[in-house]
């Protein structure tokens, strides 16, 4: 019998809502709004955690650029300058090695900066959009 009424164009959910009291409807609305808010908060938390991980990777790369530049300055400068000083004047050897080290540090710093920018802004955009959509849907339903 249930299938017959459904096939005839009757929506059992709509009939149930039409026969519900105002207090029942308000109770359902309250429950559904609570569930909706909890879901949106969970989405926001997940999104912020994801962005935080990306920011951490970018910061790690930027830090690695500094460490590599420092280690390279201490180790390779002496070895490179000494090796080049065998065929070039000492000052020119030091200049060449210094420029190469700065280029390597620049590439690492730019890569880290790009990763940091990709993680910004730290706003849960999907959750904010979801809340906006939910508010618009509720407003639409209220105005019907």
Image (cartoon, rainbow, N blue to C red):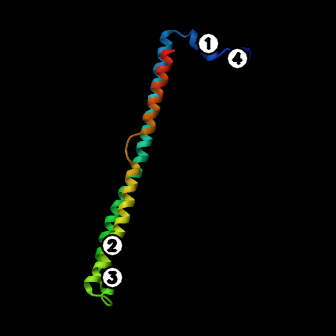
Q: Distance between the residues labelled 4 and 2?
A: 75 Å
Mark seen at residue 15: 1
Q: How far apart are marks 1 and 3 (CA)?
A: 84 Å
Describe the element under mark 3 as helix, strand or loop: helix
Describe the element under mark 1 as helix, strand or loop: helix
Vertical placement of 133 versus 55: above or below? above
Describe the element under mark 4 as helix, strand or loop: helix
Q: How crowded is mark 2: few (under 14 residues within 10 Å), some or many (20 or more)?
A: some
Q: Mark 2 points at which residue?
A: 101
**Are the residues flagged by discs 4 and 1 in contact, CB closer than 8 Å?**
no
Q: How far apart are marks 3 and 2 (CA)?
A: 11 Å
Q: In which quadrant of the rendered view does residue 37 lie?
A: top left
Mark seen at residue 80: 3
Chain-order first, disc 2 or disc 1 = 1
Chain-order first, disc 4 or disc 2 = 4
Q: In which quadrant of the rendered view does residue 89 lie?
A: bottom left
Looking at the image, which residue is at 28% across and 82% down? 92
| Residue 142 spot, x, y in % from top left | 48, 16
Chain-order first, disc 3 or disc 2 = 3
**Are the residues flagged by discs 4 and 2 in contact, CB closer than 8 Å?**
no
| Residue 127 spot, x, y in % from top left | 44, 36
**Viewer-proximal residue among 20 and 129:** 129
Vertical placement of 8 versus 58: above or below? above
Looking at the image, which residue is at 34% across and 74% down? 100
Q: Distance between the residues labelled 4 and 1?
A: 11 Å
| Residue 18 spot, x, y in % from top left | 57, 10
Q: Name the residue under label 4.
A: 6
Describe the element under mark 2 as helix, strand or loop: helix
Instruction: Look at the image and tell me whether residue 35 can be seen.
Output: no
Vertical placement of 143 versus 103: above or below? above
| Residue 68 spot, x, y in % from top left | 34, 69
Chain-order first, disc 1 or disc 3 = 1
């Amino acid at each position: 019998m249930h299938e017959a009424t459904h096939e005839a164009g009757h929506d059992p959910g709509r009939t149930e809502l039409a026969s519900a009291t105002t207090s029942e409807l308000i109770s359902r609305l309250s429950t559904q709004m609570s569930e909706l808010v909890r879901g949106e908060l969970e989405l926001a938390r997940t999104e912020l955690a994801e962005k935080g991980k990306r920011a951490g990777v970018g910061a790690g790369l930027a830090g690695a650029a500094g460490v590599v530049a420092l280690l390279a300055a201490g180790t390779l400068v002496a070895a490179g300058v000494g090796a080049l000083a065998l065929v070039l004047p000492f000052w020119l050897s030091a200049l060449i090695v210094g420029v190469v080290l700065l280029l390597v540090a620049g590439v690492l710093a730019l890569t880290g900066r790009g990763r940091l920018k990709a993680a910004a802004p730290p706003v849960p955009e999907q959750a904010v959009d979801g809340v906006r959509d939910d508010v618009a849907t509720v407003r639409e339903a209220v105005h019907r």
